[in-house]
Amino acid sequence: MDFFHVLVVLLESTIRVSVPLLFAALAGLFTERAGVFDIGLEGKMLGAAFAAGAVAAVTQSVWAGLLAAILVSVLLSLVHGYASITQRGNQIVSGVAINFIVAGSTVILGEAWFRQGGRTPALADGARFQTISLPEADVIREVPFLGPIYADLLSGHFLLTYIAFAMVPASWWVLYRTRFGLRLRAVGENPGAVDTAGISVIWLRYRAVICCGILCGFAGAYLSLAMTAGFVKGMTAGKGYIALAALIFAKWRPVNIMFACLLFGFLDALAIRLQGTPLPLVGQVPVQFMQALPYILTVILLAGFIGKAIPPKAGGVPYVKER
Amino acid sequence: MDDIAIELRGIDKSFGLVHANKDINLKVRKGTIHGIIGENGAGKSTLMSILYGFYQADRGEILVCGKQVSIRDPNTAISVGIGMVHQHFMLVENFTVLENVMLGAEDSQILNKGINKARQELKRLEKEYALEVNPDALIEELPVGLQQRVEILKALYRRADILILDEPTGVLTPAEADHLFRILGQLKAQGKTIILITHKLREIMAITDEVSVMRRGEMVATRTTRETTVEELAELMVGRRVLLRVQKGEAKPGDVKLAVQGLTVKDSRGVTMVDDVSFEVRAGEIVGIAGVAGNGQSELLEAIAGIRRATSGTVLLNGRSVDVTGHRDPAELRARGLAHVPEDRHHVGLVLKFEESENAILGYHNDPRYLNGVFLDIDAIRKDAEEKIAKYDIRPPNARLKTANFSGGNQQKIVLAREMERGPDVLIIGQPTRGVDVGAIEFIHKRIIEMRDQGKAVLLVSVELDEIRSLSDRILVMFAGRVVGERSPEASEGELGLLMAGVEGRKEAAG
């Protein structure tokens, strides 16, 4: 295979692995821009993936699975919202608690319901998402250069993949071009300004948290209904944290988030690709190192390359009317 | 009854055990500027927050233009025509002026339509009230005077007829304050009603038509401004006669105790906060540093006190050099005769969760007087605290009370007692009376003068120009990190004001 084809394949898998990151990072964007830090993206995604896998297996309907994923994720978001908005609890503690509860309970429930060691049954084709071929993909593939890009890189993804990338401009539009977005960004910077303008800080933050839940639901459903055919315990494998890192790396901006997720996705895809392949100069690299590479690079990038990322000013601080 | 814009009847509000407002009655006439004056904690802000719907009163009625209204939240307040300019601006700093003005009054779900309308409306308001400001500027890039203007515009944009301003001049230069007063005059001429909350008597006398005085949650008097005097108002506020003038004799300066040469301080972003500052403070004199907040005074103070690293320069304490650019050791400085009353007593001066006696020795806890072997000698500490409480009239006189439960003035006295009773050679004080009531101000000023008369060198930083002028023997004015001039305390306020605004200083530096 020539270099061009290798690149196309690599980029294709980059897109595939970035999708859950993208959904989750955009989910984080909504809550964090509203001033509610959310370390529980991981847990929500995992909970959603389990709900999707379980419901799709029982109902044999991919849409019921997606709906269940969103429902569970929104419910978990509301728990986080109740703890951190209404009860003014510590947002990090609440997020971590959700991660742990979900990590444990998905396995327990999975085992109790399906008796497959915490997995959900493998899904038949009708109960999971199928890839979509863009029109005329097979014909256009023959066109040199542009053909493979269209047919192999852009075509042949899941519906959720296209939705994920469409969510980037959509999120930007919501945040920067609507009243809801203006208020949401304001409440993350100075909730006092929002309160004195006669807008409910609490209701606004709840809405932001719900948006987060919906997007995390998509992320989880993608994992168990599209990327694989069923839920496997701990299948998020830290993607929620990587998404959080992408969010910070992107300085809480939608378009930057897309590039950050693609970058992290690319590192991941590269690591998979290079496993077992001897590299020039260094020779054979241990598999474990290649698996760790994206995370190592994440740390390096976060530590050194982005300059100062300034989080929303009121982030992490529950709103209390001052006396 | 037509000419009453706002009437409050029997407003009562408690927060737990604190009775913040007791049966308040107030009438504000339409088209006037009505001052509300009182010490900190007198209940002014609570009352206005009730009027703006931030809190609900436990009892009482509010009438706006003769009609009884129930103001449950800021929305209702806005809808009956009440607008508020908060002491701490309620602005989103990384939004533009336009976005801030629109927030909460956007008209439609999609912003585009509203933006053009808001822009036009803003232009109209600018013209009508001479409130010019660039609608596309980011708030964080505007000086505070303009930020405040945005707050006023926000209220006008919501068609407020009654404007409440809460301590509006606290952050302004004298020139900016004068400008604000001109704007308020203009608003009044256009028929707006203005309620001005302040603790500065001078402002009340300068621009209000009527003034109401609050003391300990009660409305004690309402006067027509023309028919009252500063002395009467001060007495009403405090409940006893107050000396507004600080009595002090001639300074008898002695040896140089503190010498600062070429001190430069950069902050964590590398921005120069203090720029090549040099001066001396002699024994038996008070040197005041005037300036608008944020012009490097805080950093200067912190660098001298050893809690912030200077980039370059030298400091001589009692003739011996202090390592200001390298290793910082505030404890060593204390041992060498430097006492520091920090600007921000809540974060630097006190641990609010500690009891009074613990704060009274904070930083001096290694003194053998307070130790019993390796343990603290609690009895000695409490006894020492009780002596200070008696001497500084700290109330309530309870050394075991949590410090957070003392009022601002009494907290400040705790810090002052701790630092002054050590008998330091050099005393540096930041904002000695910030958030302190009039009665305590008088006491604190007296103590500072006493320190001077005992031959201590005193360096005083304050954003209250009146305070600087009445206490200092020499005044240095800082602007943008530099000392732009030295004046005697007899210099006029206008002259100092121009220096503080950086106007005169530039000429001087150039010439």
Image (cartoon, coloured by chain):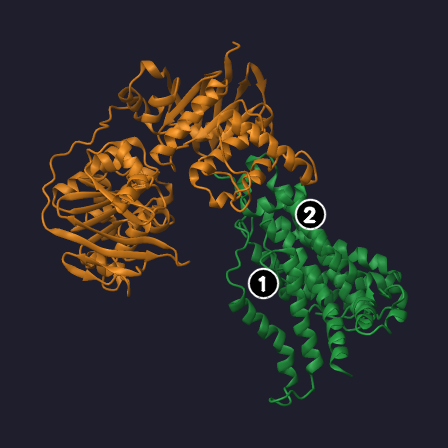
Q: Residue furthest front?
A: B511
B410 relative to A57, above or below: above
Indicate the quadrant where residue B36 lies.
top left
The percent coordinates of residue B267 (x first, y second) are 37, 56
Indicate the quadrant where residue A220 lies.
bottom right
Q: Pick whichever of labels 1 and 2 is earlier in the sequence.
A: 2
**Please, what is the three-letter code of the amino acid marked with disc 2?**
Val
Question: Residue visible at 64% across and 33% down?
Answer: B117
> In the visual, does B486 lie left or right of A267?
left
B93 relative to A279, above or below: above
**Please, what is the three-letter code of the amino acid marked with disc 1?**
Phe
Chain letter for mark 1, please.
Answer: A
Asked which secondary structure carries label 1, the reply is helix
Chain A drawn in what color?
Answer: green
The percent coordinates of residue A142 (x first, y second) are 87, 74
Is residue B260 among the parts visible in the rendering? yes
Chain letter for mark 2, please.
Answer: A
The span from disc 1 to disc 2 (Cα, nearest Å) is 21 Å
The percent coordinates of residue B308 (x first, y second) are 32, 57
Q: Which residue is mark 2?
A: A174
Indicate the quadrant where residue B109 lies.
top right
B360 relative to B20, above or below: below
